[in-house]
Amino acid sequence: MRTSPSGGGRAAVICGLGAWLPPRAVGNDELAARIDTSDEWIRSRTGIRTRHFVSPGMPTSRLATEAGARALASAGLETVDAVVLATTTPDRPCPATAPLVAHRLGLTGRPAFDVSAVCTGFLYALSTASGLIAAGSADSVLVIGADAFSTIVDPEERSTAVVFGDGAGAVVLRAGESAEPGAVGRVELGADGSLTDLITVRAGGSETRSTDVPPTRADAHFSMAGQEVFAHAVTRMAEASRTALADAGWRTEEVDRLVGHQANARILHAVGEQLDVPRDRIVIHLDKVGNTAAASIPLALAHGQSAGELLPGARVVLTAFGGGATWGATALTWPSLRTV
Ligand code: UT7
């Protein structure tokens, strides 16, 4: 599906960027001391060296509020017209987490809602927020991606426990012109529900709660069919990126930075190969944070900005693949932003 938030001249423009990681850093060796894995396996199979975990009692709303506050400061704004939060690990199954985050940011009364598209969540939220601005429903929107996957993975299950980390990233969108740097153009989005079982937490929703059968330990935790997901992720992110490039009218050699969902360095390199984007143009942040699901892209953007990899005027492609299955991509020219 293609959404065209820019319509005529009015478009959502990125004007603020913020990120936050919970303080507790967990290196590969710490995990290897507890489960049957090794620093060598994790680094060679994924590229991850360390990740951050929430401490007991620290919910996703805390991550989202911290990142949101930083994005507002970066934009130089104290208020926005709406808050959209992408997350798969809400504080509670009901209600959504975004209203609480908005309240804590001093935005009580503004519309605030969650978007659930797992690791593609940030791109779905970005598209939704852009649409609010294009339709004139809002002149500014705070878009947050926040997840605490350490709260849903089984800490004893080595295939998932080593790949995920917790964190949050956020951007502020303001109404502007489609030709401006930072304008969010078409967001190419897709989904295939026949792949629901590939990335899932089976228990805890209406499917199991409508029965009296208590969930097994495996069903109560996150599971992922790693190799199958790997193959779909490469194909879908490359396809969606090609569409985003065609929409923007850019050739692949004109791409300055590819910012893909940070699940696995091997996946990002394979996407780069399919697109002919060389490795030195691929933003890699997963070594420091692991797979942070909906937070992955805004955290990588914040890393790219502070590391000087994303310079004003750079041609950037964002792409993601996640549970659902869902996928997406968009192309934009990087704006000049204040780092906080
Ligand atoms: O975020 C949403 C999208 N997610 C993704 O895109 C993730 C895509 N998938 C992946 O990144 C990779 O599939 C993983 C990192 C999850 C796994 O890497 P893999 O190279 O696909 O490993 P595998 O699952 O095929 O397992 C290979 C071997 C197995 O042992 P045998 O059967 O060959 O003896 C596993 O039991 O590695 C074993 N293994 C481990 N060994 C040490 C699995 N996890 C671990 C581990 N440490 N943590």
Image: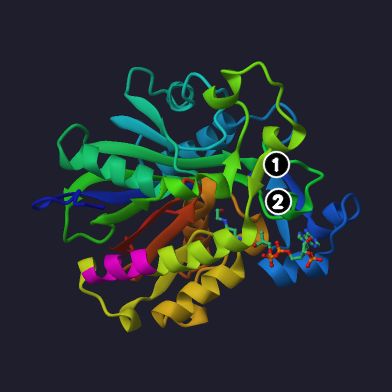
| Residue tagged 2 | 160
Q: Are marks 1 and 2 in contact (CB under 8 Å)?
A: yes
Q: Alpha-carbon neighbours of circle 1 within 10 Å: few (<14), some, or many (≥20)?
A: many
Q: Say which of 330 and 64 sits in front.
A: 330
Farthest residue to the left: give it: 8
Local SS, label 1:
loop
Q: Identity of the amino acid at label 1? A: Val
- The secondary structure making up most of the magenta span is helix
Q: CB at mark 1 closer than 8 A to ligand 1?
A: no
Query: Which image quarter: residue 63?
Result: top right
Q: CB at mark 2 closer than 8 A to ligand 1?
A: yes
Q: Say which of 272 and 236 sits in front.
A: 236
Q: Quadrant of ligand 1?
A: bottom right
Tell me if residue 310 can be seen: no
The CA distance from mark 1 to mark 2 is 6 Å
Q: Is residue 243 magenta?
A: yes
Establish if 143 lies above or below 25. above
Residue at left offset 19%, top offset 51%: 4
Tell me if residue 208 can be seen: yes
Q: Which mark is residue 153?
A: 1
